[in-house]
Image: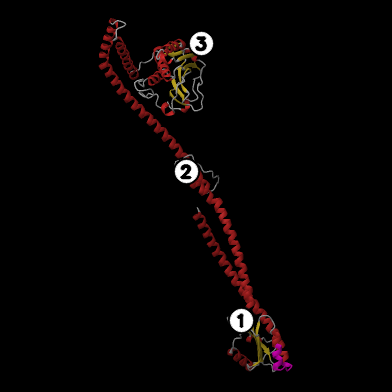
Amino acid sequence: MKNLTTRLVILLMLALMVITGAFDYFRLVRERDRLIEQTRQDTRIFAETLALAVSRNVRRGRTTEELKELLDEILARPGLLWLAIYDPSGQMVAASVRVDATVPPADDAIRETIRIRAASSTILPGKGAEGSLTLRTLVRGEESGGSAILRHIQPVRWPDRRTAALELLQSLAGVEHEFAGSIRERVLGRLAVLVVFVLSIVAVTRWSIALPIRALIRGARAVGGGDLSQRIGVRRRDEVGQLADEFNRMAENLESAHRALVVQSEERLRLEREVQQAQKLAAVGMLAAEVAHEVGTPLNIISGRAEVLDRNLATDHPGRRHLEVILRQTERITAIIRALLDYTRPRRPTLREEALPPLLARVADLAAGRDRAKRVRIHLDLPGALPRVLADADQIQQLFLNVLANAVDASPPGGTIRVTEGPDPVLRSEGRAGILRGEATRPCLAIHVVDQGPGLSADELTRVFEPFFSTKKRGHGTGLGLPIVEEIVRAHDGDVEMLSIPGTGTEVIVRLPLAGEEANGSAPVKSPAAGEHGR
């Protein structure tokens, strides 16, 4: 920007200097010619007056010494360097010179002209013959100061009516001094004008050009750096304003294209993940079917033989303890295989109007007996009359059993799990992270399951619904509980949301569509965090 401003100022200065310099040059030349011409006119008038005085003094018979004294007195006139009187024969009668002047030698051509003129004619009054001997010559560098000298020859009437001459040398030092003063005044004036002009140009270019272009540069750098929200606040109707408007329009188009590209990329990524998930599920389904086929029959044989031994062994038999371990582990393997089959081959729900309180009570009893050593208490804080939901009772029971089982596993010994209902989350919003799966588009009933466990981090929350991901110790979970919960709520056109605060606890919100008349006049229940997390 400095280069542009400096270049513009220099070009304008050069143009102004050339234009004003040429104009001032011609004006000064005319002024100098005018001053010289004025000096010539004054010298001519003075010479004519002096010629009359000399003519009278010669007729009165003044001597050469008296004429010289007369010339010495007249020489006191400012600028006069030399006065000389020539008789009709061209001889110098009297002369006077200023003490500090260097007088040029007499011009022989002038003397010869005077002699020829005196011999050929006489001067008669009113005939104008004087004018024929009036010679004006500008001589430069003859004075000691180096100034120009104006030489003037004035005809004089001699007593015998012949033509004599009077010579004057007038210094032009005063004219040159006045001319030099005019130059100084003109130069100083032009410099002042030039300074004001430069300052004005700098101010105008800074306000009108530099600042808008700097804004354009900053905007271009910001857009080039990836900040497509950058806009230029230049509101003008000239070309700079049009450029700023076009830049803002370009930035808006780029931002819109970038947003569309991001949406397309996210959609493509989501589809790729769904494809990968489908491929993974297909592989898991094939694996589960193969495992069920290969493991099912031996497992049934082991389970059957163990049950036969259990019935035949005495209660106090020392091998009964090992037999009970075998039965528990076969039941665990059977549950894992069943979970795999349920996840990979979900059953279409049979929807009926169901009341949740009795179902939740049964699930709470089952979940409480999962780990009696921890003495975890499940508190059902539900109103007496909850609206019915449209659901498959078996699948909803499996859903809440998985949720409560996770809550029991996460709770500390002696902790309390609270099951309640309401549209708003129970955990406070400060430091809370969350994730939402599914999308409830109909009026729903929201059931909250809140534990007092260690909670989950934001990174862990983003993966809780991934198959086989688990925060439990190895061998204590399959990582299929929450993925099965997600599949069930999606099949019911509901959603599930998990909120957590590290060190405080975790809240799972299950939203199920209301049934029949309960849904009329009700709005879909949405968590405030639903718009903040991906599905």
Q: What crowding class fits label 2: few (fewer than 14 Cα within 10 Å), some (14-19), or many (20 or more)? A: some
Q: Which mark is residue 222?
A: 2
Q: Nearer the viewer, mark 2 or mark 3?
A: 3
Earlier in the chain: of badge 2 and badge 3, it is 2
Q: Which mark is residue 385?
A: 3
Q: Label 3 amino acid?
A: Ala
Q: Nearer the viewer, mark 3 or mark 1?
A: 3
Q: Label 1 amino acid?
A: Ile
305 left or right of 162 in image = left
Give the extent of the magenta segment: 58-70
- Name the colouring of the figure: secondary structure
Report the residue at 35% width, 19% height from top: 343
Looking at the picture, how far across and down is residue 137, in whole percent?
60, 82
What is the C-alpha distance between the residues marked 2 and 3?
59 Å
> Which one is in front, 398 or 307?
307
Q: Label 2 amino acid?
A: Ala
Q: What crowding class fits label 3: few (fewer than 14 Cα within 10 Å), some (14-19), or many (20 or more)? A: few
Looking at the picture, how far across and down is residue 67, in whole percent?
70, 91
Quarter of the figure with residue 344: top left
What is the C-alpha distance between the residues marked 1 and 2?
74 Å
Tell me the element at label 3: loop
Report the residue at 33% width, 27% height from top: 276
For residue 38, above or below residue 524: below
Dot 2 and dot 3 residues touching (CB under 8 Å): no
Looking at the picture, how far across and down is residue 532, in whole percent?
47, 28
Q: What crowding class fits label 1: few (fewer than 14 Cα within 10 Å), some (14-19), or many (20 or more)? A: many
Q: Main secondary structure of the magenta part?
A: helix
Q: Which mark is residue 149?
A: 1
Looking at the picture, how far across and down is residue 228, in whole percent?
46, 40
Report the residue at 43% width, 37% height from top: 258
> Which one is in front, 350 or 59?
350
147 left or right of 320 in image = right
